[in-house]
């Protein structure tokens, strides 16, 4: 049966139940139940301290809220669609507990600043968890990089063999990408840690509230200095989703390579059995499902971002009911990034790396052609001419199935008299990697340096960790 609403004083009719269900958010905003109670406790504490409510009234309300908080942790709050959203559900439960005094909790507050407060708190609570999970994955990347400084594989551009690189260098590239993700989420905290509480509906309040007090009680670093902005702003959530999208984009690139590398054609890596699945029809199959799934889940996080950007586009100030659509995408993206990070961490930790296969792949692929061009350029030949000479040698090598390092000295010298026997040193793929000591290059010492810097950046998150 449709019941009269808390706000129903000026209404003569109630909406049909299907419309109420359509308008309700309790199915999903119950995820903010803890934050809603926390926000109310801070608000009522302030109402008591400022004398807006008597200390006795405030204490009774606070006590009721604390009981609800305990019931929540024990999984026992009874929430109903009839009460629309988490804010009115909690207030209804409080009323059932302490009677009409509960109605004083909403003094100098609106659901508009209340929902904004809950949402800020929810994201503020998640950010450190996201950052911690990101760092765990970075730890694995550093470990793998450290172990594979001297593992060599073909570096590619256009997915064509380009120049040999260190596998450690490859892992550190992802480490750096994730480091920027950490920094972005960190910065996101600055835009999230701002209290909207006390902005009331949109214009502030005539009550002598203390917004600094509630902000401090809730662990917010700042307060919004404009009440319209406070209730209208969802930038922090959009920023969070943009950061989540960027992170997923990074993970999907790594996943794509793991999928390729575990194929029969590459066989550079093998997923551990714990991170692969079989086929229901083909007994031999070992599928990199988890990597594929992370790659696939990028779509939903981009969708969450696009969804919220679109909800907020063109909205007039201040609160509009459209904004109720702001939460599910943020909840969904959080579940997705946390799950993806966790699975990726396990998958990389247990990954079987076939260093021999990787090394074999650079032996006859002409990926040392740049070495020969550089060799000639170092002897004074303009690089363009060197490039042309080596190009012709490569063509000859392809036709005769002879890698550059297997060509007789006489053949090389016929192409350029500048070439002497020491060229074979430079043509060794290991040397090609080791000698790239330019800042940020793939040279072994350079990669070791990157690993050391990575450990420093991780600081406490690295100290004492072991990866098995
Ligand atoms: N359930 C609403 C939301 O999530 C709460 C705010 C409602 N405010 C209002 N003025 N109708 O956005």
Image (cartoon, rainbow, N blue to C red):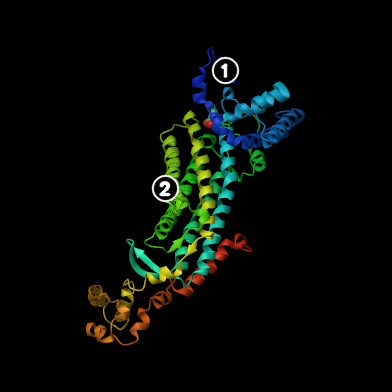
Report the side of 75 relative to 339 (left or right).
right
Residue drawn at x 45%, y 69% as measured from the top left: 355
From this viewpoint, is residue 210 visible?
Answer: no
Q: Is residue 325 above or below residue 10?
A: below
- Residue 344 vertical position relative to residue 355 in the rendered view, above or below: above
Numbered tag placed on residue 8 in the rendering: 1
Quarter of the image where one finds residue 361: bottom left
136 sits left or right of 381 in the view: right
Secondary structure type for disc 2: loop
Rendered image: mark on residue 281:
2
Q: Nearer the viewer, residue 333 or 210?
A: 333
Q: Ligand 1 near label 2 (Cβ, under 8 Å)?
A: no
Where residue 33 appears, as percent x and y from the top left, is 62, 34
Nearest the camera: 266 or 425? Answer: 266
Disc nearer the start of the sequence (1/2): 1
Judge by depth and name the residue closer to the eye, 382 or 448. Answer: 448
Q: Position of residue 291 (x, y in %)?
A: 46, 52
Q: Residue 236: x percent and y percent?
A: 51, 43
- Residue at the spot x=56%, y=61% of the render? 139
Total of numbered circles in the picture? 2
Q: Quadrant of residue 213?
A: top right
Q: Residue at 51% across / 56% down in the picture?
A: 273
The crowding category of the residue bearing disc 2, from other C-alpha atoms within 10 Å (few below 14, some 14 to 19, many at least 20), is few
| Image quarter of residue 75 | top right
Please say if 35 is above or below 259.
above
Q: Secondary structure at mark 1?
A: helix
Taking 172 as reference, is 96 above or below it? above
Q: CA distance from mark 1 to mark 2?
A: 60 Å
Q: Is mark 1 within 8 Å of ligand 1?
A: no
Quarter for ligand 1? top right
Identify which residue is drawn at 42% across, 59% down.
262
């Amino acid at each position: 049966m449709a019941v009269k609403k808390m706000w129903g004083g000026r209404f003569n009719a109630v909406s049909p139940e299907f419309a109420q269900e359509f308008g309700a958010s309790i199915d999903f905003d119950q995820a903010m139940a803890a934050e809603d109670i926390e926000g109310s406790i801070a608000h009522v504490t302030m109402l008591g301290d400022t004398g807006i409510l008597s200390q006795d009234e405030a204490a009774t309300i606070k006590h009721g809220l604390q009981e609800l908080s305990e019931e929540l942790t024990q999984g026992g709050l009874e929430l109903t669609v009839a009460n629309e959203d988490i804010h009115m559900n909690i207030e209804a439960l409080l009323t059932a507990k302490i009677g009409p005094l509960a109605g004083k909790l909403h003094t100098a507050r609106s659901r508009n600043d209340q929902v904004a407060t809950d949402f800020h708190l929810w994201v503020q609570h998640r950010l450190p968890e996201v950052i911690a999970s990101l760092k765990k994955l970075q730890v694995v990347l550093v470990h793998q990089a450290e172990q594979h400084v001297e593992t060599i594989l073909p570096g590619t551009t256009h997915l064509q063999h380009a120049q040999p690189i260190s596998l450690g260098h490859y892992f550190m590239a992802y480490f750096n990408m994730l480091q920027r993700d950490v920094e972005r989420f960190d910065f996101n905290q600055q835009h999230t840690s701002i209290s909207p509480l006390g902005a009331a509906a949109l214009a502030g309040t005539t009550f002598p509230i203390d917004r600094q007090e509630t902000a401090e009680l809730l662990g917010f670093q700042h307060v919004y200095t404009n009440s319209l902005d406070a209730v209208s702003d969802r930038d922090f959530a959009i920023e969070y989703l943009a950061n989540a999208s960027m992170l997923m984009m990074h993970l999907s690139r790594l996943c794509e390579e793991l999928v390729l590398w575990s194929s029969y054609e590459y066989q550079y890596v093998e997923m551990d059995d714990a991170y692969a699945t079989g086929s229901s029809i083909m007994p031999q199959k070992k599928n990199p499902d988890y990597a594929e799934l992370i790659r696939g889940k990028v779509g939903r996080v981009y969708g969450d971002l696009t969804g919220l950007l679109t909800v907020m586009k063109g909205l007039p100030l201040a609160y509009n009911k459209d904004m109720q659509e702001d939460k599910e995408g943020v909840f969904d993206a959080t579940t997705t990034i946390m799950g993806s990070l966790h699975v990726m961490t396990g998958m990389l930790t247990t990954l079987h790396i076939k260093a021999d296969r990787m090394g074999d792949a650079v032996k006859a692929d002409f990926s040392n052609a740049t070495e020969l061009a550089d060799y000639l350029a170092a002897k004074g030949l303009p690089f363009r001419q060197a490039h042309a000479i080596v190009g012709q040698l490569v063509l000859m090598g392809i036709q005769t199935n002879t890698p550059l390092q297997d060509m007789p000295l006489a053949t090389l010298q016929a192409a350029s008299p500048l070439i002497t026997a020491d060229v074979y040193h430079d043509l060794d793929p290991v040397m090609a990697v080791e000698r790239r000591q330019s800042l940020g290059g793939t040279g072994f010492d350079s990669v070791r340096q990157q690993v050391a810097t990575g450990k420093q950046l991780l600081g406490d998150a690295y100290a004492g960790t072991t990866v098995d």
